[in-house]
Structures are given as structure tokens and as C-alpha cells.
Image (spheres, rainbow, N blue to C red):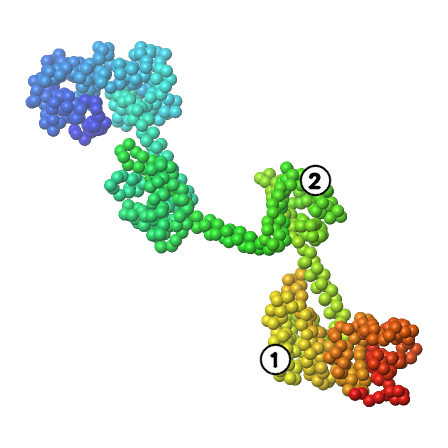
């Protein structure tokens, strides 16, 4: 029996509706004589003040007096006819009940107990309690309608009972939010089919149109001919639902905020500081743990134990003092400081710490930090670069320009070689260039045009001009403009640099002339080479023969100089050559301001034998590559040595004077004993003037003044191999002057002077 009744009792197992399942016992003639309790739920047991296990499967007469036969008549009618009925009943404790009964099986009656019977019981409707919003609902093919309701439901819906029950408002769907109606209807259909209690939350529409959340629990009262009657209780859960939604929304927002905090590239930590207690870590994100290179648990332990352990000992006192001052002044602490990570590595952090006092005397401490190590390194690099720029600009002739094309305003800063800086601001800069007195008149339009091109053609524009900024004469400047753009891509600024390139251009021109002269003179030299000392390369090498070329030169500059030194037969000359012409010595000489070097020595010249030569080197910097280059020339000095020996031999004869004169320059050189008495760079003209001053003023001296000139002597040499003159000696007697051109030495005049005795024969020299 219990197995068959389980489907009727299960829906009411934990239901708040008092429910009793009883079996009617008859006397055989159809009259009911007693009731057997087959099921009693906790709500009914509390109402009847009975324990369910005490009355389970026991007769009513065993624990309470039987009610009058008139009271049991409705139960008898329902148990064997299948109808439903309601009747009042008073318990043994004096509790007045309204009992609604209906047949679940033949002879089995379900009893719904209501401690406060409603007026509908007189009309045959199930009694509805007034403690909770209740209704009797009818589900049919036409839909769901309200058959009965109590005052609580009227108050909940904001409608009167008449409005809820009248024909025009008969459809219950008008009371339900349209979005919730399909789920509610499906739940009632499933409950009616499965004969179970319906349980559904939905939004009930009040009379003013506002929705209110309710929880519906509806128990099947009867089901016949496709019509199911439910006894429904509606709990007002609007506040709980809204609070639940608000709580879920807050939790969702909190989770989203937590995910957002973990994704932020800034280390964040929230602490609670209480007087006399350790810090409490409330929240930290992953970036905070990553920056300090500790797990969240390890980081929390160190923060609670000693937050200052992350600071270097030398910085702790100063930073903690700053934190105390900021907290006392109720202002945040912003500081870039050194921090020791969990691995012991020192980093620079940009910290932002704020304190928020709480009502209980504690404080909420928020910490935000970012790794500023790269910024600190960049700042140090920037300071170093700024100092380097100041050092580079300290003794340079340079102008820096900052031009605003919108305002036509230029800020100019000039650096002088003396280390002085002057700044000035020029309004209407572009217009003023056409009349600027410090600009060369021919270059004013060129400079203005270069600025306009820089404004219309983004990039770097270079130009040169002549200017006199210091009043020392025109100097050549090279200016370069660079464009700066705004967010729209328009040029908003021009940055310019003007450098004095006068010396550079002169050096470049000197280098070009030197290279050209080297190419021309290399054809007449015994050997010549052009060496790149910076790149250690031999750029060009020529010699009178291939054997000499192989003997003197190599591919690298260092090897070439070593090979040239090895070609010297004398070890002492090799040492002097190496000391003067090694790459290091040449670079040192150039740095010291010595650009020309020469050395006379002997060299093994292959088939030419050992020759006396003069090695000369001229140093210059290539303006294109900025490399130091050396131009070497080896000239054969054999003829010169031969002529020197010849002149020395002439000087050893009985000549009073032996001179050689450079025809182009007129400079004379004395040989023999007279070389010590004749000053250096004495000219032929000054020597003749000195001689004529020793003579008395006579017509003969006037004639000699005309004859003793280089021009007159060269004119006589055009028609004769020698030119001779008789010169009176100041001390008495006569000198014979003989002039001739030296062979193989073009442009050199040989002059000899011998005293003539009175008989006409040369006298021996004293």
C-alpha cells in the first residue's frame, strides 16, 4: 500500500502545506467508522501536535476521539465518489481547522489542513490560508486562471480579489512577465502530468506595471477531464532576488576587477595597517609578485614581517621618514627608489603610496609600483650624453637653431671657441634674413631658400653660407635642418645646426692639392707611395723599376714602412728611419702639429746600387674618410752630392769667394771658408749693395752698380758661356768675378771671385 501511495505523498514530503493521507474504514454497509493515517508531513504534524512516527498506519480512534458522524460524512463522500469537499474540524488541543479533502485512490483521501478557513469553503473551493499569498489555480486547455485567492495575494499583486477573479482578468498570464510565462506554464504542465509539486520563480506584474519576484510552489489538488487544480503558495522573494542579483553582480564585478588587476602592467597591493599589529595583505596582483620575484605567499609573509626588508639599508631611514611625513600630511608618497627583489637583484621602482584612515583607527594602504630601472638607466645615459655634448660644444664654433614656422620665431645659441655661449631670440627670422648684416649678401637668399625647402620637404636639408658673427671676417658655415612633426603630420618645428667649416674646407682643399701634387711628382721620383695609416693600407705605390717597387713597398702601411727601413744598408740609419717613420711616430707627429718630415740616407736600389736619397713624408687627414694619410717620396740625391763635392773642391782652390745663387729667388749660398762669414738667406742684390758701399762714389762705381745685377749677368750669359767682371778691391788691387750656369742644376748660378795681381796673373790666396 505504501508503495502505491508514495507518488501522492512525495510532493508534500517537505511542503509547508499541512497534508494528511488517510484510508477510510467502513462497517461493510458503506458507512465510515474510522480513518487510518497513511502519511503525515511535518507541517501537518506540527499543526496537530503529533509525531509522524506515532500515528503512521494507526487508526484515528487510537490516539483521539472520533468526530461526529456528520463531520466524517464529507470524507466518506469523497473517499468513494471521487469528488472534493471542505469541512471544519477542531483538534484535541482546540485548534480550529478547515479541512479540504479529495480522493487520490478509491477509499484513500488526501486532507489539506488550514488553520484559518476562508470564505471560499462555503462555495466549494479549497480553503486558502492568509499567512502567505495563496491561490487556487486551474490549468486547462484554455490556459491558467485563478479560481480563488486570499488577501495576501491581493496585496502582493496590488489588485483586488474581484479584479483577479473576474472574467476579463481570468487569464493568469496577464499577471506574469511575458519573458517568464513560458517557463512557468511548462513547469505547471510537467507537474500536472507527473503529479508532483510545481516549483518556479517568476516575476509577478503588479497593478502599476512594476514586476516583483515571487517563488511559486503549487500542489496538485485534483486532476479530472484535462483540468488540473493547484493549491499554490507565492512567496515574495523580490528583495532576496534583488539582493542576490546585486550580490552576484558585485561578486562578478569583483572577479572582473581581480582579473583586470592581474592583467594590469602595474604592481598593485592593498594593505591594512592597525596600530600595534602587523600589516594585513588584503589584495595583490600578479605583476606585484613578478616585480619582486616572490610567490604571493612568500611576499605576504615578508610584508607582514618587515616591509622595509625590500629597501637597501642605506636608503631605509630616508624613505621611511618620507613615508611618515607624507602620512602625517595626508598626501601620497611619490618616489623613485632602489628596491631589492626576492633574488637580491637591485632595481629602481617608481612608487605611489597612499593612506586612507578608517573609522576603527586602522588605515588602508595602497601601493602602486612600476619597474623604472630602464628609465633610471636612460636618465643616467641622458645625463652622460648631455655632459658629453656640453664637452664637445665647449670649444667649438657652432650655432644651434630652433625655429617655429608658425610664429616665425627662432631661438639661436652660439658656441664660441673660447667656451662662451650666447643666446638670442629673433622674431620674424625668415623675413630678417634678406637684410641680415652678418650674412654675406650673396648667401642671404640661399639660406632663406634652404629653410623654405625644409618646411615643404620633410627630412634633413643641408646648405652652406658665409657669415661674420664675431666681426672677424667672412667664414664658411654648413647648416643642417631637421623637421619635427605634430600629430597631424605637419611640420611644427625646425631644428638646425650651423658649423664653422672654414678650416675644414681649407684642410680639404689642401688635401686635394697635396694629392694632386703627389701624383705629378711621383713620376720624377725614385719611388713614391701613399699610405692610409688609420686603415693600415697602401693606397698607391710607384718606383723607377719593378724590382725597386717590390723591394720597398707592401700591401699594408706598417709592412711597407718596415720594408723601406730594411732597404737601408746602415743599421744606424735603419734605426733613425724607424724612429721617424713608424706608424706610431707619424701619428704622434701629426697630433703634435708636425705635418712634414724628411730624412737623408742611403738605400739599396737593386740594379742602381746603393744610392743617397732623401725620404720626405707629408701628413694630412682625408676629409672624406677622416683617415690619416702619409705621402712618401724618395728622391735621388746622387747629382746633388756630386755637385756639392764639386763646389767643395772649388772652394778648396785659391778663390777668394765661391757662391751659388738661386736665379728665381736670388738667395746665395757661400762655400768654403766664406760660408761661415756669409749670413743665411743672403741675396745676390744685398751682397752687391754691400760691396758697392765699400767703394768711393765714382763713375766706375755707378757702372758697376748696373753690371752687378742678376738680370744683367743672365743677359750676358745668353751669348757667352761665362760672364767676367774686373772689380776694384776696397783695400786696393783688383778682383776678377766669373759667373756661369751649373749644368744639371737649372736655375742655379755659380759665382767665383779671385784676386788679380798687378802683373795680371792670379795671386796665390793667403
Tell me what residue is drawn at x 51 percent, y 53 percent: 384
Tell me what residue is drawn at x 31 percent, y 34 percent: 357
Q: Which mark is residue 711?
A: none
SS class, disc 1: helix
SS class, disc 2: helix
Q: How many marks?
A: 2
Give neighbour class at mark 2: few <14, some 14-19, many 20+ (Cα, 10 Å): few
Q: Position of residue 109 (x, y in %)?
A: 18, 21
In this rendering, is residue 606 above or below 460? below
Q: Position of residue 688 (x, y in %)?
A: 83, 74
Identify the residue under disc 1.
575
- 422 or 256: nearer the viewer: 422
Tell me what residue is drawn at x 28 percent, y 16 percent: 153
Q: Quadrant of the N terminus?
A: top left
User: Tag 2 or tag 1, which sits nearer the N-term?
Assistant: 2
Q: Quadrant of residue 674?
A: bottom right
Mark 1–mark 2 Cα distance, whole angstroms, equals 65 Å
Give neighbour class at mark 1: few <14, some 14-19, many 20+ (Cα, 10 Å): some
Q: Quadrant of residue 227?
A: top left
**Residue 550 in view:** no
- 377 or 599: nearer the viewer: 599
Q: Quadrant of the C terminus?
A: bottom right
In this rendering, is residue 532 above or below 24? below
Q: Which mark is residue 431?
A: 2
Q: Position of residue 696 (x, y in %)?
A: 86, 74
**Residue 217 in view:** yes
- 75 or 391: nearer the viewer: 391
- 377 or 414: nearer the viewer: 414
Amino acid at each position: 500500500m505504501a508503495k502505491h501511495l508514495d507518488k501522492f505523498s512525495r510532493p508534500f514530503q517537505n511542503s509547508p502545506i499541512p497534508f494528511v493521507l488517510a484510508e477510510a474504514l467502513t462497517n461493510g454497509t458503506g458507512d465510515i467508522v474510522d480513518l487510518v493515517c497513511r502519511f503525515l508531513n511535518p507541517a501537518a504534524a506540527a499543526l496537530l501536535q503529533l509525531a509522524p512516527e506515532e500515528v503512521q498506519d494507526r487508526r484515528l480512534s487510537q490516539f483521539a476521539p472520533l468526530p461526529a458522524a456528520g463531520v466524517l460524512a464529507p470524507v466518506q463522500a469523497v473517499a468513494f465518489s471521487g469528488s472534493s469537499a471542505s469541512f471544519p474540524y477542531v483538534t484535541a488541543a482546540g485548534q480550529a481547522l478547515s479541512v479540504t479533502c479529495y480522493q487520490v485512490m478509491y477509499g484513500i483521501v488526501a486532507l489539506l489542513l488550514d488553520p484559518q478557513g476562508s470564505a471560499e469553503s462555503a462555495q466549494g473551493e479549497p480553503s486558502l490560508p492568509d499567512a502567505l499569498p495563496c491561490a487556487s489555480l486551474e490549468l486547462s486547455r484554455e490556459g491558467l486562471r485563478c479560481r480563488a485567492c486570499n488577501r495576501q495575494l491581493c496585496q502582493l499583486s496590488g489588485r483586488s480579489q474581484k479584479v483577479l477573479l473576474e472574467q476579463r482578468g481570468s487569464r493568469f498570464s496577464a499577471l506574469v512577465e511575458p519573458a517568464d510565462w513560458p517557463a512557468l506554464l511548462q513547469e505547471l504542465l510537467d507537474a500536472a502530468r507527473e503529479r508532483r509539486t510545481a516549483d518556479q520563480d517568476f516575476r509577478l506584474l503588479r497593478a502599476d506595471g512594476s514586476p516583483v519576484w515571487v517563488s511559486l510552489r503549487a500542489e496538485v489538488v485534483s486532476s479530472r477531464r484535462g483540468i488540473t487544480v493547484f493549491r499554490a503558495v507565492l512567496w515574495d522573494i523580490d528583495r532576496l532576488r534583488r539582493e542576490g542579483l546585486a550580490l552576484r553582480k558585485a561578486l562578478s564585478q569583483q572577479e572582473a576587477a581581480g582579473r583586470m588587476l592581474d592583467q594590469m602592467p602595474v604592481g598593485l597591493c592593498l594593505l591594512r595597517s592597525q596600530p600595534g599589529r602587523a600589516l594585513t595583505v588584503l589584495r595583490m596582483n600578479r605583476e606585484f609578485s613578478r616585480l619582486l620575484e616572490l610567490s604571493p605567499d612568500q611576499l605576504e609573509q615578508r610584508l607582514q614581517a618587515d616591509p622595509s626588508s625590500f629597501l637597501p639599508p642605506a636608503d631605509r631611514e630616508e624613505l621611511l621618514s618620507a613615508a611618515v611625513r607624507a602620512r602625517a600630511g595626508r598626501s601620497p608618497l611619490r618616489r623613485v627608489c632602489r628596491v631589492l627583489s626576492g633574488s637580491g637583484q637591485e632595481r629602481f621602482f617608481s612608487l605611489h603610496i597612499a593612506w586612507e584612515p578608517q573609522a576603527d583607527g586602522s588605515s588602508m594602504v595602497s601601493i602602486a609600483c612600476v619597474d623604472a630601472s630602464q628609465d633610471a638607466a636612460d636618465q643616467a645615459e641622458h645625463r652622460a650624453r648631455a655632459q658629453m655634448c656640453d664637452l664637445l660644444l665647449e670649444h667649438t664654433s657652432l650655432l644651434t637653431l630652433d625655429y617655429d614656422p608658425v610664429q616665425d620665431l627662432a631661438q639661436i645659441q652660439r658656441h664660441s671657441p673660447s667656451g662662451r655661449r650666447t643666446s638670442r631670440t629673433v622674431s620674424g627670422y625668415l623675413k630678417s634674413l634678406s637684410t641680415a648684416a652678418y650674412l654675406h649678401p650673396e648667401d642671404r637668399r640661399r639660406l632663406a631658400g634652404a629653410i623654405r625647402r625644409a618646411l615643404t620637404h620633410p627630412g634633413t636639408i643641408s646648405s652652406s653660407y658665409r657669415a661674420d658673427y664675431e666681426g672677424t671676417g667672412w667664414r664658411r658655415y654648413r647648416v643642417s635642418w631637421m623637421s619635427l612633426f605634430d600629430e597631424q603630420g605637419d611640420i611644427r618645428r625646425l631644428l638646425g645646426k650651423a658649423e664653422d667649416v672654414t678650416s675644414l674646407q681649407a684642410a680639404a682643399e689642401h688635401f686635394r692639392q697635396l694629392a694632386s701634387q703627389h701624383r705629378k711628382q711621383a713620376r720624377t721620383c725614385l719611388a713614391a707611395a701613399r699610405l692610409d695609416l688609420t686603415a693600415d693600407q697602401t693606397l698607391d705605390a710607384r718606383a723607377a723599376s719593378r724590382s725597386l717597387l717590390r723591394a720597398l713597398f707592401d700591401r699594408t702601411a706598417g709592412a711597407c714602412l718596415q720594408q723601406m727601413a730594411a732597404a737601408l744598408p746602415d743599421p744606424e740609419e735603419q734605426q733613425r728611419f724607424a724612429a721617424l717613420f713608424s706608424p706610431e711616430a707619424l701619428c704622434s707627429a701629426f697630433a703634435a702639429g708636425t705635418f712634414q718630415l724628411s730624412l737623408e740616407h742611403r738605400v739599396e736600389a737593386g740594379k742602381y746600387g746603393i744610392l743617397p736619397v732623401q725620404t720626405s713624408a707629408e701628413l694630412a687627414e682625408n676629409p672624406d674618410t677622416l683617415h690619416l694619410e702619409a705621402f712618401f717620396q724618395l728622391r735621388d740625391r746622387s747629382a746633388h752630392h756630386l755637385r756639392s763635392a764639386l763646389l767643395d773642391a772649388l772652394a778648396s782652390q785659391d778663390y777668394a769667394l765661391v757662391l751659388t745663387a738661386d736665379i728665381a729667388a736670388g738667395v746665395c749660398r757661400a762655400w768654403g771658408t766664406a760660408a761661415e762669414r756669409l749670413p743665411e738667406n743672403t741675396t745676390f742684390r744685398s751682397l752687391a749693395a754691400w760691396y758697392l758701399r765699400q767703394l768711393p762714389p765714382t763713375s766706375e762705381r755707378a757702372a758697376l752698380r748696373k753690371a752687378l745685377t742678376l738680370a744683367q749677368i743672365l743677359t750676358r750669359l745668353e751669348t757667352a758661356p761665362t760672364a767676367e767682371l774686373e772689380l776694384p778691391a776696397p783695400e786696393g788691387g783688383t778682383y776678377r768675378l766669373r759667373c756661369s750656369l751649373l749644368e744639371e742644376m737649372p736655375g742655379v748660378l755659380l759665382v767665383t771671385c779671385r784676386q788679380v795681381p798687378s802683373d795680371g796673373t792670379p795671386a796665390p790666396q793667403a
